[in-house]
Amino acid sequence: MFAISLGDGAELRPLEPWQAEEFLAHMDRGRTFIGRHIGLPDAVTDLDSARRWLQSYADKAAADAGRLHGIWLDGLLVGGVLFRLFDAETGNCEAGCWLEPDAAGRGLVTRATRLIIDWAIRERGMHRVEWLVSSENTPSIDVARRLGMRRDGVLRANHPYRGVRQDTEVWSVLAPEWRSA
Ligand SMILES: CC(C)(COP(=O)(O)OP(=O)(O)OC[C@H]1O[C@@H](n2cnc3c(N)ncnc32)[C@H](O)[C@@H]1OP(=O)(O)O)[C@@H](O)C(=O)NCCC(=O)NCCS
């Protein structure tokens, strides 16, 4: 299986439906931490839903409408980075990420996201990469900053999550900014 080294024993690899069991075990380890701001753990609760979620990204990849990669640390699946949206025609895409708590604080997501943004801009000619994040989610906002993104603005109270309406910040980087950084 192909893998890209992220250094320090970490690798970026495709994450596919046949890995549903491994993915569910990872989600169970990180459920509380990951679910503070994003609904991924609520969508992945058992083997069927894990397989369905991975299949939805396999379908997006086949349609060139999204991508999903897992992050493995010393052989253990600990997180992922993705393009939730990918529109080659308009040159716009939206990246996202998550980690289980033991893998946080090592720069893994920053390094992995840098690789997929580089691929999107340099190989696929994308023009704009977005990062949508709850305004409460400081670690994710820090990732956007480390990637050299700028804050476009705030969608006020646009996202009802677990009974509370959240503000969503929109961050982005454009191809010329990425190339010159
Ligand atoms: C968002 C999330 C992935 C950020 O995780 P993270 O570990 O802070 O991000 P990174 O993997 O890029 O690591 C950065 C941290 O490692 C440190 N670090 C160590 N080595 C590093 C390196 N080589 N490069 C960059 N950072 C490094 C940084 O200083 C930073 O730590 P700090 O915040 O204490 O300063 C994590 O909080 C998470 O999974 N949250 C739940 C899911 C979620 O909210 N996803 C985002 C949706 S928008």
Image: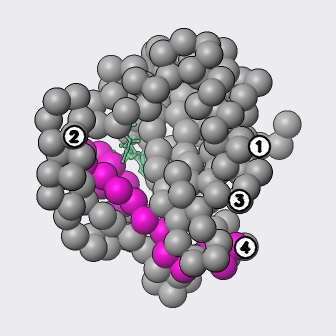
Image quadrant in which you'd find residue 137 = top left
Q: Is residue 156 above or below residue 127?
A: above
Tell which circle, 4 or 2, labels the residue nearer the N-terminal end: 4
Label 4: which secondary element: helix
Which residue is depicted at the point 55% across and 39% down?
80
Q: Which residue is mark 4?
A: 123
- Colour option used: one colour
Tell which circle, 4 or 3, labels the residue nearer the N-terminal end: 3
Q: Amino acid at mark 2?
A: Pro
| Circles 2 and 3: CB atoms closer than 8 Å | no
Q: Residue furthest right?
A: 1
Q: Which residue is mark 1?
A: 3
**Image location (x, y in percent) of residue 168:** 24, 54
| 104 or 63: nearer the viewer | 63
Image quadrant in which you'd find residue 143 = bottom left
Tell which circle, 2 or 1, labels the residue nearer the N-terminal end: 1
Q: Amino acid at mark 4?
A: Glu
Tell which circle, 2 or 3, labels the residue nearer the N-terminal end: 3
The part of the chain drawn in magenta is 124-145
Q: Which residue is mark 2?
A: 160
Please identify, in this view, whether the residue under mark 2 or under mark 1 is nearer the observer: 2
| 115 or 15: nearer the viewer | 15
**Image location (x, y in percent) of residue 45:** 48, 15
